[in-house]
Structure formats: structure tokens, C-alpha cells
Amino acid sequence: MKILVTGHKGFIGSHMSQYLLQKGHDVEGFDWVESVVPAVEQYDWVVHCGAISDTTERDINKVWRHNYEFTMRLLQICDNYQTNIQLASSAAVYGPNKDFNEEDPCYPQTPYAWSKFLIDKFLLDAGIDKFNMLVQSYRYFNVYGPGEGHKKDQMSMVSKFQVQAATEGKIKLFKNSDKYKRDIVCVYDLVRIQEEMMHQDVSGVYNLGTGKAVDIESVAKVVAKETGAKIEYIDMPDHLKNQYQDYTCADNSKLHNTIPIRHWITLEEYYKDIVNDRKT
């Protein structure tokens, strides 16, 4: 298939492009240019990874222009030319909600989360299966993997711990981190699943997470074991205490009912088979 990847130089977009090429697809990339929407009529699929992914970005107009308006225009031209599209949504749409089924209410808390929620809402309100193309929107949970360095404070906790271990020889961990749990998903699983979904004649909004929550302290201990770093326990800053999400876990039954997912990469496997291989 011929596939266009927006945001192809970013973290997920670069992995997506590389994997699609490995699977034998004809892949091209698109970089953001103000007021320019790519010509999509020549493609079988558009994988829209391009966006402002900084969840702390407070410039509402900037987020609205990049994440909402551009995506809406892209949907329109894909509909015009019957070009299938995959969208990168986010579990951030759920906000403080502790239920993570696609049918559950959403309570977005940031401009970023709102931009993703409103796209999903538009698709569902319009009837996602009524477009002239397939539309698949994926609510990513906590994605980690190689190539996050440019994200700085927005890196996954796995990559943050790796950087601390490499630069300081220790991992700074908030006290009581065993009480906080996250659904962490390896980027290699993400791109594999989305490629498999291209072969399914389905549209929908899907959670993309492992369906298993792991506590943050356990994540830090795995990284510490693999890197030889120590763990330093620190107090959580006051300004984070009311903002720190204590639990995320995807209800991925809808995805599992669409394609068989036999295995998710564990963090231990990620280090054994991927990170350590990259060192040799």
C-alpha cells in the first residue's frame, strides 16, 4: 500500500514510517507547513501522527490550529478522495476519570486533551462509519521507546528514568510511587497494531494500551536493575499533588475483538531484546 505519514520525524511518526517500510509499504512523509494540507488522493492510507504533543502547552490558539483545525481539514480531503486515515488520539481525553472504556465519559483537562477529544467527538457524532473512507482513531496510553530525547520533559517515564540513570547514575522517584499505576505501551507494539488494523475493514475509536497497569516504582526498579543505577526517593512537589494522575489502564477489549493480540512487549523484554541489542 502507499501510505503518507504526517509527523514522520517525530517519536511515533518515525517509528511508524520505519515499520511500514519494513512491511513492504510505499511510505512518504509530510512536514507541517502553515496553511498547507497534503494531497492525499494518491495514497491508500494517511497515518496522522503530526501534532503538538506537549500536554502542558497552554497556547490554546496554537494547539487549536495545529491539532484541531488541521486534522479537520485533513479529514475533509480524505473524505473527498476516499483515502483511509488513522489518527493519533490520546488517553488524556479521559481526564481524571478512572474508567477507560471508549464509551465512558471524557473529562479533558488541557488544551491538548480537548483538541483530541473534540476530534473524536466529531467523528462519533457524525457517525464514524458513515464517511467515504475508513477512519481509525487511537487513544494512546503511556507510550515509550527509543527516540524520545527531543521531547525533554514530555518523555515517557521509562525514558526519563533511562536518562537520569545514564547522566546521574541514579533515578529520582517520588515517594509512594508504588501507589501510582500506568498502562505503559511499547512503541513497537503500537506501530505493529496500527499496521495490522490497516488490513481490517473497520472504522472506530480504539484504546491503544496493554490493558495492564504497572506501578511507577516497579518501572523504576526495572530500569535501575538494567542500568545499574540507584533509586533516590524524593518528595512530590506541592504543585503536582493535585495534578498527578494515580491510575491509567486501557480497556482494550474493543481492539482485541477486532484483531488478535497474542502478546504485548513487557518492559523487561524491551530491555532484553531491544535496548541491549542496540548497545551491541
Image (tube, grey):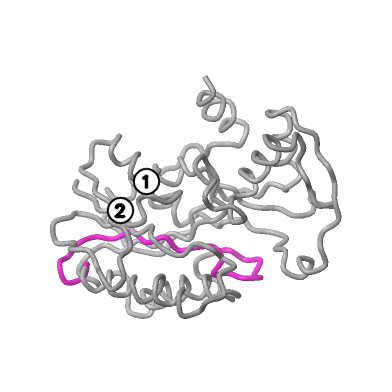
Q: Amino acid at mark 1?
A: Met
Answer with the quarter of the image where residue 118 lies.
bottom left
Circles 2 and 1: CB atoms closer than 8 Å: yes
Picture coordinates of residue 226, whole percent (x, y)? 68, 28
Q: Residue at x 56, y 33 (%)?
A: 270
Sequence-wise, which precedes: disc 2 or disc 1? Answer: 2
Q: Circle 2 sits in a helix, a strand or a loop, which is it?
A: strand
**Residue projecting furthest to the top:** 280
Q: Amino acid at mark 2?
A: Val
The residue depicted at 70 percent of the width and 41 percent of the height is 164
Circle 2: is it few (<14), some (14-19), or many (20+) Cα within 10 Å?
many
- Residue drawn at point x = 62 percent, y = 48 percent: 212
Residue carrying label 1: 16
Residue that numbered label 2 is attached to: 5
Residue 259 can be seen, yes or no: no
Q: Which residues are magenta?
A: 78-100
Residue 80 is covered by the magenta coloring? yes
Q: Nearer the viewer, residue 186 or 12?
A: 12
| 69 relative position to 74: left or right | right
Establish if 29 lies above or below 279: below
Q: Nearer the viewer, residue 246 or 154?
A: 154
The reply to whether the magenta stretch includes residue 72 is no
65 relative to 148 in the view: left or right = left
